[in-house]
C-alpha cells in the first residue's frame, strides 16, 4: 500500500463521531486508505456497541487497556502504518470529497515539501456555528509564535517517523508540538490555500478549548522548543 494514505485515529468514548463523521467522509475519497483506529480505553457501552458495526470499514483496530492520552494512542497507531503517507486524524473530522486526493496531488508535486496542510472549518457542536480557520504559507518563525497547522495534514511516513514517539506528557496543543519537532529537524510544509475538512468543536475532548489552559500549554511548548527559537534568531 505504498501509494495509499494511512489514517491514524485515536478514539476515547467518541465512536459516534467515527460512525457519522469520519468514516462516511472517507467513502468520498478516491485514494486507497488504511484506517487505523486506536481505542484509548473507552468505557462507554454505547461506544463499544457502535464499534461492532464499524469493523468492516477499519483496517487495523487496537484497544489499550489503560487510558494513556491521544499522543500515546497515535504513537501506537503509527506503529501499524504500512503506506508512504500518513494523516493523524480525530474521529470528528469530516473530509470534503477528494480532500485527501488533493493533499496527495500537492505533496507529490512539491519536491521540497515533507508535508502539506490546509485551511479547515470549525463547527460548533452546540449551536452549529461555523468558523474558518486559515493557515498561512510555511514560516518557521510564525510557527514558533503560534500554531497555524492542524494535525489533520498529509505527512510522508518517513518524515513523521522522525518525530516518534510522540510526547505523551503533552496534554494540549499536541499538533503544534509535532510540527515544531519536525521544523527543528529541518523539514518543511506546503500550504494548500483552501478548506479541505470540517472539525467539530466539542464542549469536551480533543477539540475543546479553554483560554487559561491554552496559555499554560503554549508556554510549555515554546519552552520545549527553545533551540528552534534560538536558531531562528541567529
Image (tube, helix red, strand yellow):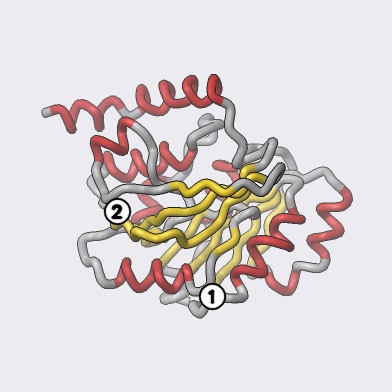
Disc 2, SS: strand
**Labels 1 and 2: the sequence-earlier one:** 1
Q: Which mark is residue 75?
A: none
Residue 201: x and y, percent? 62, 43
**Quadrant in the rendering for residue 178:** top left
Q: Are marks 1 and 2 in contact (CB under 8 Å)?
A: no
Q: CA distance from mark 1 to mark 2?
A: 22 Å
Task: Name which residue lies at 31% across and 48% down.
Answer: 136
Q: Quadrant of the C terminus?
A: top left
Residue 110: x and y, percent? 24, 66
Q: Nearer the viewer, residue 53 or 19?
A: 19
Q: Is residue 10 above or below residue 192?
A: above
Task: Please give the residue where the numbered disc 2 appears in the rendered image.
Answer: 189
Q: Nearer the viewer, residue 43 or 137?
A: 137
Task: Please give the residue where the numbered disc 1 appears in the rendered image.
Answer: 29
Q: Is residue 6 above or below residue 219?
A: below
Q: Is residue 158 above or below residue 150?
A: below
Task: Name which residue lies at 49% across and 20% down.
Answer: 216
Left or right for 129, reference 79: right
Residue 2: x and y, percent? 42, 75
Task: Name which residue lies at 42% across and 65% down.
Answer: 85
**Quadrant in the rendering for residue 184:** top left
Task: Name which residue lies at 38% across and 70% down.
Answer: 104
Looking at the image, can residue 223 be seen? yes
Local packing at callout 2 (Cα closer than 10 Å; few below 14, some 14-19, many 20+) is many
Residue 208: x and y, percent? 62, 36
Amino acid at each position: 500500500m505504498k501509494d495509499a494514505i494511512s489514517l491514524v485515529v485515536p478514539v476515547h468514548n467518541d465512536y459516534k463521531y467515527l460512525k457519522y463523521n469520519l468514516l462516511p467522509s472517507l467513502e468520498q475519497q478516491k485514494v486507497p486508505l488504511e484506517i487505523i483506529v486506536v481505542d484509548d480505553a473507552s468505557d462507554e457501552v454505547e461506544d463499544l456497541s457502535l464499534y461492532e458495526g464499524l469493523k468492516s470499514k477499519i483496517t487495523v483496530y487496537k484497544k489499550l487497556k489503560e487510558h494513556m492520552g491521544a499522543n500515546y494512542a497515535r504513537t501506537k497507531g503509527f506503529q501499524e502504518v504500512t503506506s508512504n503517507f500518513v494523516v493523524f486524524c480525530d474521529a470528528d473530522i469530516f473530509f470534503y470529497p477528494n480532500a485527501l486526493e488533493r493533499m496527495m496531488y500537492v505533496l507529490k508535486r512539491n519536491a521540497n515539501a515533507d508535508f502539506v496542510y490546509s485551511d479547515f472549518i470549525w463547527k460548533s457542536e452546540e449551536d452549529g456555528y461555523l468558523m474558518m480557520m486559515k493557515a498561512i504559507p510555511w514560516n518557521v518563525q510564525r510557527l514558533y509564535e503560534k500554531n497555524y497547522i492542524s494535525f489533520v495534514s498529509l505527512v510522508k511516513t518517513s518524515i513523521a517517523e522522525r518525530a516518534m514517539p510522540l510526547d505523551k506528557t503533552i496534554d494540549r496543543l499536541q499538533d503544534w508540538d509535532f510540527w515544531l519537532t519536525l521544523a527543528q529537524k529541518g523539514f518543511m510544509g506546503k500550504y494548500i490555500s483552501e478548506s479541505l475538512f470540517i472539525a467539530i468543536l466539542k464542549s469536551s475532548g480533543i477539540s475543546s478549548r479553554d483560554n487559561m489552559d491554552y496559555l499554560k500549554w503554549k508556554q510549555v511548548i515554546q519552552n520545549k522548543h527553545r533551540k528552534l527559537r534560538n536558531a531562528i534568531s541567529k
